[in-house]
């Protein structure tokens, strides 16, 4: 389903500088990162360490100051704005902390939006949106406006919208930041199952260790550089853990 | 942790024999810990001595007779007292990671930050293991979930403590 | 004070919103001030012109119709109690042969010994008239005519051509500035000789004692006057010119009302929007413990500060624009206007407009923000979002519409006077604009339904976005509706007038050649006369069929002042009048019998019809004549009557001829031309005259279009401003759409469709309002002037105006759309 190549995202020497003079901020200072297809990567770091900037740069929302980002083997630096837009539309799905749903559209229409923007006939787009909504267990809410949904439901709609184009890469920024713990758990479980069952490649920014622990790999940032990159083994089952000897 | 009160509690819903008690305790209540049958009977004897339980002999299916234990009124009162009272909250400050960090600080050429970093990785790996197990587990009993939550929260707390260590010692 | 710092921070944080808000006030105040000042200056200058001539005189004794009379006849008037001085003057238009052809001058004959009581003539160079018997000219006028001290100047007068030496140059001001300096001052005796007055004067100007009761003095003067003489306030002379000015002024007034409404609306709109968008922030302040009154106070102070800055800029801009517009009007009227009149009323209203409306526009949303539950504002994501047209809006708009219908019926039925037309037009504008928010949601739904298939995804999304913000949408399209109303209303009225004038002169200007001393002054309708003997010389040219004299004579008919056109009428010749009713043959016979033909305008004003009698004030006392017919007439602003030459001469004892109408074959043209040149006269062919009138018409149209264009430009600026704001506030949504894969082009389309949709929904109320306004102007044209027009809607113009508005909206969207497309996505996503 995803690209067969061995690399979904490749970031090399990525540097991002904001402002000049007194207001100059080096948000990213030479990041190298390779994400394999189907991998679920968590990016952690203190506030201001550059997590969102990294995500935006990978997602072609911000051009890098230096360095390169390759998605599915294509270097973003060689693409013009329209090509980048199409790439975002077809290959990348975004999930934001603030949900960012279009308030005037129903849940289903929000999910269908990227397909419709891509020129798919509305009926077909809606059918695929319905499938995506089913995946996040929101079929009964398909006709509701965002204002009529709870925070957790809105975030699940946002995830469905990110998934509907069957993207190579899901970029998720603090998905539980605006949610209570129950809703947050549900969203995280949903992301985990997407990685497990649908083989989605996910890069998720979070500052919550519990959320990060849902991923397969943890990248820790500090002041714009990678402090640690830890791939986590597949652990034991719950029953085994429950009867583990305390010694 | 009080095995005595666990046994009193398991008898609260009716008389049971020793093997039965051990199986319920080990499979449902405290899976992370072994209880041998000898311990069970020793405890039952002491409880009987204190007047909390009493037993009678019953002939089992195979013809062998078994001791079946039942809660006395006195025993019931003791159980209620235990449940109603607060448990001691041990601070449990004999922590190995702390010890390592403290020792590392005292040895020339050993950086306690390295210790912290390694422990963090290890701790996160544990957290990852529990979290994933908890997420993937299908049809886990509520009590098991609660235990896994306990583990997750403790590990998260410990990770946070490691962050503190790193900050304070830098 | 500390809270105010919060405001300045807020301005810095959202520079776009701040600049647009500021621009809203600058545009609103600037347009009102510029147009207001222009109108005031134009009005003032015409009054000032005639006041200048009268000088300090409070009253004047005149013969009917400004004819000459014996100074002795009124001499005892000077001894009336309350009269300080009685100053005789003789005055009439004459033609001065200038380097660019003849120009009309007013010859003013004064008695140097007495005149200082009435006028101050300050000399810049040369000698005063008590020293030499020469002529005084305004220095700057002499300069532009290429004349210097000591030069002879050649005047064509009813007594023929004469030469007077220029002996003095005058400083500007007072009588010297009359008619833009087109005045030559000579001794009374010389003026009498020049004008063929033979010891007669045209007016005895009375300067009263300090504190004298003008009405009482006038009454006792009137009692002493012989028949044929009357006493009046000097301003009455301006009546005819006043009509001319009123014809220009009525649309000018309408335009200034329009600019007031447009300016007010733009300001109101900008503030309503900019405060509406800060709902969340205001809720936060409330949550932190700011009381309602503190919040209103903060917002009010903030708005007033911003409005203050914008108003000052706007007034400055308005004054600058007024200078530009006046230059245009001067060129059209051929006048030298006395500089911009800094009318206190306009300036004060302009100064109050910005802060006043800003305060109103702040108070409403501030009160709403204060009443809204704090949490709703803080967590807009929890609610459906968007805005709402306040509930009280609908009944108010409905009441206004009903009132508007009543007012319209009032005009049609003639219950309301034409003077009310400008405020009525303002009222129509306000009503139409305020009803926009009531109809916009349904119109939007309708338009969306109709276009759904054709729109595509971005278009549909654009419509939904608009529907979610009905208030913001309505306010934006309201500005556009205003432009459409103005365009259609004014355009149709102007075009209607133009068509009618063209029709009129097609039917009336038939003669082959015209000989005259100079063209009548456009603003004053005064025309210099030639000696009456010259006509015979032209008649003697072989081949000439007919030479008929024509005279324009200011006359008084009962309470009205009008221009009498005296001409020879003959049975068998075309009437050359645009009859409203009656048959041409009968009318000619009646004219020859000594009856008169009235312009419909004059008839309406006098309340007379065919067969009625009117009383003319003549030098020989009142004369009653019968009305033979009614005509459409545009000369003298329509206040005209025709009489046969002989009858007029008997009544008014006319000296001199203003125009000779010559009917002759083309072969005679060179000879006629030569003859005219010999006498220093102007020679015009029929084509020349038509061209002259065409130029005046296109000048008029040009001026209207120019001012109208200005209103449209203001409205367009308003639309750009509001639309920019509208787009700015969608920054976050647009950022999101870009993030999930909308290309720049699609975003531009998204914004463009919004602009077009805004245009579409504003066109319906705009078109209705525009037609209503055109009708109101037509109805008032009859009520005010009595001009009979056929009301017909210029479809091309109407559709053109609608298309133009849509185009303006589309263009107005261009800048914000580009801005939206180029916004950095990550920034936009962080926008709240
Ligand atoms: N548009 C911007 N302009 C200037 N500085 C920015 C911008 N975006 C982010 N930064 C700065 O870059 C750094 C990293 O920001 P960010 O990636 O948002 O951090 P995180 O998401 O880890 O909290 C911060 O210091 C932040 O202030
Ligand atoms: Mg962030």
Image (cartoon, coloured by chain):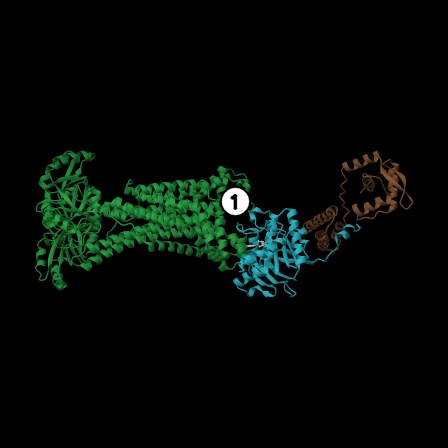
Chain colours: A cyan, B brown, C green
Which one is nearer the viewer's eye here, A196 or C598? C598
Foreground residue among A207 and C401: C401
Q: Position of residue C255 (x, y in %)?
A: 32, 48
SS category of the residue bearing label 1: helix
Count of numbered marks? 1
Compare residues B76 and C305 and report the one nearer the observer: B76
| Residue C118 occupies quadrant | top left
Can residue B64 be seen in this snapshot?
A: yes
Q: Position of residue B113 (x, y in %)?
A: 70, 54
Badge 1 residue CB within 8 Å of ligand 1? no
Q: Residue at x 52, y 62 (%)?
A: A82
* Relative to C673, residue C211 above or below: above
Q: Is residue C1 visible?
A: no
Q: Is residue A208 left or right of residue B1?
A: left
Which residue bears the numbered disc 1?
Answer: C281
**Circle 1 chain:** C
Ligand 1 - quadrant of the structure image: bottom right
Residue A231, horizontal then vertical, whole percent = 69, 59
Horizontal side of C806 relative to B107 (left or right) equals: left
Left/right of residue C54 with respect to residue B102 in the rendered view: left
The image shows residue B43 at horizontal and vertical percentages of: 86, 41
- Relative vertical location of residue A68 with respect to residue C445 in this rendering, above or below: below
Q: Is residue C79 above or below residue A171?
A: above
Describe residue C127's horizontal placement relative to residue B80 as left or right: left
How crowded pointer 1 is (Cα within 10 Å; few <14, some 14-19, many 20+) is rated as some
């Amino acid at each position: 389903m995803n690209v067969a190549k061995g690399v979904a995202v490749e970031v090399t020497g990525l540097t991002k500088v904001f402002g000049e003079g007194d207001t100059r901020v080096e948000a990213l200072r030479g990041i190298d990162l390779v994400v394999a297809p189907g991998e679920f990567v968590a990016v952690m770091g203190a506030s201001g360490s550059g997590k969102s900037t990294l995500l935006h740069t990978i997602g072609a929302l911000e051009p890098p100051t230096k360095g390169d980002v390759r998605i599915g083997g294509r270097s973003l630096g060689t693409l013009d704005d329209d090509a980048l837009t199409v790439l975002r539309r077809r290959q990348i799905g975004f999930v934001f902390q603030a949900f960012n749903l279009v308030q005037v559209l129903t849940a289903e229409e929000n999910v269908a939006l990227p397909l419709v923007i891509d020129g798919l006939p509305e009926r077909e787009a809606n059918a695929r949106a319905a499938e995506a909504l089913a995946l996040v267990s929101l079929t009964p809410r398909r006709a509701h406006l965002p204002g009529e949904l709870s925070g957790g439901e809105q975030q699940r709609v946002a995830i469905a919208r990110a998934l509907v184009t069957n993207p190579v890469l899901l970029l998720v920024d603090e998905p539980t930041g605006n949610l209570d713990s129950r809703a947050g758990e549900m969203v995280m479980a949903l992301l985990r199952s997407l990685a497990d069952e649908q083989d989605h490649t996910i890069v998720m920014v979070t500052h919550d260790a519990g959320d990060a622990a849902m991923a397969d790999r943890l990248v820790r940032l500090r002041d714009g550089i990678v402090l640690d990159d830890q791939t986590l083994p597949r652990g034991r089952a719950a029953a085994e853990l429950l009867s583990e000897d305390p010694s | 942790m009080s095995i005595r009160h666990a046994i009193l509690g398991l008898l609260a819903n009716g008389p049971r024999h020793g093997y039965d008690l051990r199986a319920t305790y080990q499979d449902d209540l405290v899976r992370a810990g072994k209880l041998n049958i000898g311990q069970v009977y020793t405890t039952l004897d002491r409880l009987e001595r204190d007047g909390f339980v009493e037993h009678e002999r019953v002939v089992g299916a195979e013809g062998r007779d078994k001791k079946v234990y039942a809660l006395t009124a006195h025993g019931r009162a003791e159980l209620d007292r235990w449940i109603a009272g607060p448990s001691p909250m041990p601070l449990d400050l004999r922590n190995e990671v702390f010890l390592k960090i403290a020792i590392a600080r005292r040895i020339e050429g050993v950086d306690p930050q390295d210790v912290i970093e390694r422990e963090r990785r290890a701790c996160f790996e544990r957290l990852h293991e529990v979290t994933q197990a908890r997420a993937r587990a299908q049809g886990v009993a509520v009590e098991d979930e609660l235990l896994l939550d306990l583990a997750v929260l403790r590990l998260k707390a410990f990770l946070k403590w490691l962050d503190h260590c790193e900050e304070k010692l830098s | 004070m500390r809270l105010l710092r919060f405001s300045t921070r807020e301005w810095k944080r959202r520079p776009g919103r701040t600049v647009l808000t500021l621009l809203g006030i600058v545009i609103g105040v600037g347009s009102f001030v510029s147009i207001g000042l222009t109108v005031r200056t134009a009005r003032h200058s015409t009054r000032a012109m005639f006041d200048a001539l009268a000088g300090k005189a409070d009253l004047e004794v005149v013969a009917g119709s400004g004819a000459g009379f014996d100074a002795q006849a009124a001499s005892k008037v000077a001894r009336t109690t309350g009269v300080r001085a009685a100053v005789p003057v003789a005055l009439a238009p004459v033609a001065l042969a200038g380097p660019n052809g003849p120009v009309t001058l007013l010859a003013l004959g004064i008695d140097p010994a007495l005149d200082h009581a009435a006028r101050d003539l300050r000399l810049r160079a040369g000698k005063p008239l008590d020293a030499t018997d020469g002529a005084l000219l305004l220095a700057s006028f002499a300069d532009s005519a290429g004349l210097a001290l000591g030069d002879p100047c050649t005047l064509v007068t009813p007594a023929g051509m004469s030469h007077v030496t220029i002996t003095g140059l005058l400083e500007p001001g007072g009588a010297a500035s009359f008619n833009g300096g087109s005045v030559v001052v000579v001794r009374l005796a010389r003026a009498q000789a020049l004008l063929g007055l033979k010891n007669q004067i045209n007016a005895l100007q009375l300067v009263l004692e300090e504190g004298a009761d003008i009405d009482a003095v006038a009454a006792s003067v009137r009692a002493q006057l012989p028949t044929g003489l009357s006493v009046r306030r000097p301003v009455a002379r301006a009546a005819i010119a006043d009509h001319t000015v009123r014809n220009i002024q009525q649309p000018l007034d309408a335009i200034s009302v329009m600019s007031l409404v447009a300016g007010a609306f733009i300001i109101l709109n900008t503030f309503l929007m900019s405060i509406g968008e800060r709902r969340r922030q205001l809720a936060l302040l409330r949550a932190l413990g700011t009381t309602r009154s503190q919040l209103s106070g903060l917002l009010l102070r903030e708005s007033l500060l911003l409005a203050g800055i914008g108003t000052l800029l706007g007034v400055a801009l308005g004054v600058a624009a007024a200078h530009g517009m006046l230059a245009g009007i001067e060129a059209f009227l051929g006048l030298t206007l006395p500089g911009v009149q800094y009318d206190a009323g306009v300036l004060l209203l302009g100064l109050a407009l910005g802060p006043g409306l800003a305060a109103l526009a702040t108070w409403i949303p501030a009160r709403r923000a204060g009443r809204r539950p704090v949490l709703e504002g803080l967590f807009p994501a929890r609610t459906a979002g968007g805005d709402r047209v306040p509930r009280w809006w609908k009944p108010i708009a409905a009441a206004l519409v009903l009132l508007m219908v009543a007012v319209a019926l009032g005009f049609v039925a003639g219950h309301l006077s034409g003077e009310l037309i400008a405020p009525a037009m303002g009222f129509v504008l306000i009503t139409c604009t305020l009803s926009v928010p009531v109809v916009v949601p349904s119109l939007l739904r309708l338009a969306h339904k109709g276009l759904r298939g054709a729109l595509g995804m971005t278009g549909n999304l654009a419509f939904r976005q608009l529907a979610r913000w009905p208030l913001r949408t309505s306010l934006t399209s309201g500005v556009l509706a205003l432009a459409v109303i103005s365009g259609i209303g004014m355009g149709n009225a102007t075009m209607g007038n133009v068509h009618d004038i063209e029709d009129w002169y097609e039917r009336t200007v038939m003669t082959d050649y015209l000989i005259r001393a100079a063209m009548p002054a456009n603003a004053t309708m005064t025309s210099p006369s030639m000696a009456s003997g010259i006509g015979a010389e032209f008649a003697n040219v072989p081949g000439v069929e007919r030479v008929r004299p024509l005279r324009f004579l200011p006359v008084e008919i009962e309470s009205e002042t009008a221009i009498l056109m005296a001409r020879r009428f003959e049975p068998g010749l075309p009437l050359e009048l645009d009859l409203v009713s009656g048959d041409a043959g009968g009318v000619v016979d009646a004219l020859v019998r000594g009856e008169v033909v009235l312009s419909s305008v004059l008839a309406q004003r006098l309340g007379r019809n065919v067969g009625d009698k009117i009383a003319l004030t003549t030098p020989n006392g009142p004369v009653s004549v019968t009305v033979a017919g009614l005509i459409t007439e545009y000369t003298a602003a329509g206040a005209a009557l025709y009489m046969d030459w002989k009858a007029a001469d008997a009544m008014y004892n006319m000296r001199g001829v203003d125009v000779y109408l010559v009917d002759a074959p083309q072969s005679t043209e060179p000879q006629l031309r030569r003859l005219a040149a010999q006498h220093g006269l102007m020679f015009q062919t029929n084509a020349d005259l038509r061209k002259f009138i065409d130029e005046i018409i296109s000048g008029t149209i040009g001026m209207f279009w120019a001012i109208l264009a200005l209103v449209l430009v203001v409205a367009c600026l308003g639309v750009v401003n509001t639309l920019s704001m509208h787009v700015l506030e969608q920054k976050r949504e647009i950022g999101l759409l870009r993030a999930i894969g909308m290309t720049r082009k699609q975003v531009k389309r998204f914004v463009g469709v919004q602009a077009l949709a805004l245009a579409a929904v504003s066109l319906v109320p705009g078109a209705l309002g525009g037609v209503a306004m055109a009708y109101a102007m037509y109805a008032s044209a009859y009520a005010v002037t009595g001009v009979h027009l056929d009301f017909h809607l210029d479809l091309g113009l109407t559709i053109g105006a609608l298309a133009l508005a849509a185009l303006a909206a589309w263009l107005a969207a261009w800048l914000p759309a580009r801005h939206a497309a180029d916004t950095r996505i990550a920034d936009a996503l962080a926008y709240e």
